[in-house]
Amino acid sequence: HKVNQVHRTGYHFQPPMNWINDPNGPMYYKGLYHLFYQYNPKGVVWGNIVWAHSVSKDLINWEALDHAIYPSKWFDINGCWSGSATILPGNKPMILYTGIDPKQRQVQNYAVPKNLTDPYLREWVKPDDNPIVDPDNTVNASAFRDPTTAWWADGHWRILVGSKRKHRGIAYLYRSRDFKQWVKAKHPLHSSPKTGMWECPDFFPVSLSGQNGLETSVVGQNVKHVLKVSLDLTRYEYYTVGTYDKKKDRYTPDNTSVDGWGGLRFDYGNFYASKTFFDPSKNRRILWGWANESDSVKDDMQKGWAGIQAIPRRISLDASRKQVIQWPVEELETLRGQKVQLNNQKLQQGEHFEVKGITAVQADVDVTFSFPSLDKAEPFDPKWAELDALDVCAQKGSKAQGGLGPFGLLTLASENLEEFTPVFFRIFKAPTKHVVLLCSDATSSSLGNGLYKPSFAGFVDVDLTKKQLSLRSLIDHSVVETFGAGGKIVILSRVYPKLGVFDKAHLFVFNNGSETITVENLNAWSMKQPLMNAPIRK
Ligand code: DQQ
């Protein structure tokens, strides 16, 4: 099978070929990071799902192992769907996953390593007392999946299983003393009307002091909890920050967090079925998420592959305690090669300049902008409050002249700007505050046909007293993954330039607002190629 390399990513996680989706069971064990993921061994569209398995010492260079979990028993004969890992006392990894049984019911199974002395955890055993959780007659057996990492409190393990009842999204709670016999709690941990199926729930503690991650079972005074769900109706995720009451076993979002479509997102672009794990070696919590293709199935067949994983992100609670912040794991910086640096460059209305001297098609760009005042911010149209940021971005793209902004980067651009993916800020003035919009707009990303080219965008709550805004974009052939305002907002776009490929790709900085912008500081690096899923020699 020949894989066409034009839009293939250089440093984002992917196997050599075929379809991938959700990250599964990430964990750290005996010096190795393990990532499993939903994989179709037979093609470029979803189907025949197994758990493919890779290992890494640094979250950046990956080696591929044989599939860890694949249909072989009645309780998973029609598919091995998403799930999570828990490290049990005594350093014993355990996987919980959803199996599709002969009646197409979704059941929850467990799998254990055959040999705990093998740090690669190559072989997994699925004991015959599976499934450990059956859909009882009150749950919808075709909407009952994606068990979480377990947490322990007061003598019981607890897990969530995603589900729905009519249009209500539900995170069912199960308890167990021994990890084998699980009993459904009378109340779900949380649910919310009109949100539809909750896929891939994730529930974890975050520290109120500092950016260190917490082991999943930590509860108590100095923590808040985050509940994330993936909504299959829109293919977006949202999360809330709230309080977990272990006595009542209920989770209550804070009044600054909202459930449903209007909720906060880990990523305002192409990012789904995400999952976190605690990394004890660096005391951090790491978020993995899947980015689907935005091209056609025909393109995918030509490419021979579909789907990538986003760069793993360190995740912690923001100082405001209202949201999380995310940042690419520090190990990514080991791929930085050739560097260019710029300081104190002014950009007047309508100006742009090229950042030369790096491989613009595969780069890491970190830039801080400043502006003399907020006076020129355009008025915030109150109608927009009801609109999605996406619509504002579509209406007021990078080309529409503004007041304070649009300014930012033109990524994966062709030399004469027939193609470009702008990543930019626009600042608006609402009656009592300023509103910052970050856009990653694929509208002009490609002259190609049959592509999905959304104007992804989100509003971000950022302190503008220093009159500065920062952006970091990870550019990788068909990926633009942008961290705005120090990681308070993230947007991943998939784009497929026709002209702006390989050494024909360019990077520009632009300003189309009437206020002059200063590029205080810009660092850009060419990114090297890591080892990406080469098979380990046996
Ligand atoms: N993908 C899996 C499911 C999950 C969905 C199947 C989310 O377990 O709900 O491949 O993308």
Image (cartoon, rainbow, N blue to C red):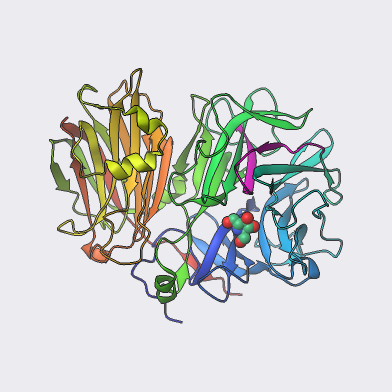
Which residue is pictured at 38% across the width and 59% down the height? 452
- Check the picture and name the quadrant holding the C terminus: bottom right
| Residue 34 can be seen, yes or no | no
Identity of the residue furthest to the top in this view: 432
Q: Is residue 287 left or right of residue 200?
A: left
Looking at the picture, how far across and down is residue 116, in whole percent? 75, 59
Nearer to me, 401 or 370: 401
Looking at the picture, how far across and down is residue 59, in whole percent? 51, 54
Magenta part of the chain: 186-206
Identity of the residue furthest to the bottom in this view: 1
Which residue is pictured at 25% across the width and 45% down the height? 409
Image quarter where ligand 1 lies = bottom right
Taking the magenta stretch, the answer to whether it contains residue 226 is no
Nearer to me, 330 or 86: 86
Total numbered badges shown on the rendered structure: 0
Nearer to me, 351 or 452: 452
Q: Is residue 436 left or right of residue 25?
A: left
Q: Quadrant of residue 142?
A: bottom right
Q: Is residue 354 left or right of residue 189?
A: left
| Residue 446 can be seen, yes or no | yes
Taking the magenta stretch, the answer to whether it contains residue 202 is yes
Looking at the picture, how far across and down is residue 121, in whole percent? 68, 62
Nearer to me, 403 or 328: 403
Which residue is pictured at 61% across the width and 64% down the height? 53
Looking at the picture, how far across and down is residue 470, in whole percent? 32, 35
Is 498 placed above or below 30 here? below
Is 227 placed above or below 302 here? above
Which residue is pictured at 23% across the width and 38% down the height? 407
Q: Is residue 289 left or right of residue 474?
A: right
Is 268 placed above or below 130 here? above
